[in-house]
Image (cartoon, rainbow, N blue to C red):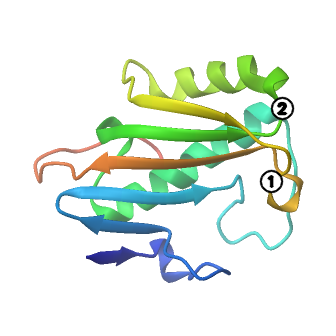
Amino acid sequence: MDFIVPGNTPPAGHYSPGVVHNGLVYVSGQLPIKPGQAEHVIGTIEEQTEQTLRNVQRVLQAAGSDLEHVLQMTIYVSDGELWGKVNATYARIMGDHRPARAVVPVKDLHYGYQIEIQAIAALAPPSHTAEYQVP
């Protein structure tokens, strides 16, 4: 097993942002926290969804994968009423790639955020180059 810590910034809790094992990348639940930002800014659900997906992407890239190789995502959302906006942002970022997905409504998320996403992806072949932009 290889433990992935993008940007060499360890998480605050007792976990790894990502683990690579047997050709798969397991991404721990990501919140819409901007890397390097200490304060917790709660934006719109669209902004939170995009930042959360970018955080997933960041872990995947550090592991040698990308969003195009995601096999499954689990999305935790604090209010089912937000789902349409979450899905629209998700579709915009994921494009034609449609991994398996579960949506789990939850009561509260850490710091008052409204979304958390975890993922499982395959490692990208060495010749694969992603066109994604990591902010």
Q: Which element carries disc 1, helix, strand or loop?
A: loop
The quadrant where residue 72 appears:
top left
Which residue corresponds to mark 2? 79
Amino acid type, mark 1 = Leu
Q: Residue 12's spot in the image, x, y percent?
A: 68, 81
Q: Residue 67's spot in the image, x, y percent?
A: 39, 41
- Is 108 situated left or right of 85 in this image? right
- Is 9 situated left or right of 23 in this image? right
Neighbour class for label 2 at 10 Å: few (<14), some, many (≥20)? some
Q: Residue at x 51, y 52 (%)?
A: 56
Amino acid type, mark 2 = Asp
Which residue corresponds to mark 1? 109
The quadrant where residue 29 appears:
bottom right
Quarter of the figure with the N terminus: bottom left
Image position of 19 with respect to 68: above or below:
below
Residue 14 visible in the current orientation: yes
Q: Residue at x 48, y 30 (%)?
A: 101
Q: Residue at x 81, y 39 (%)?
A: 78
Q: Residue at x 71, y 52 (%)?
A: 32
Q: In 3D space, how far apart are the residues under numbered discs 2 and 1 (Cα atoms)?
A: 11 Å
Q: Residue 70's spot in the image, x, y percent?
A: 35, 40
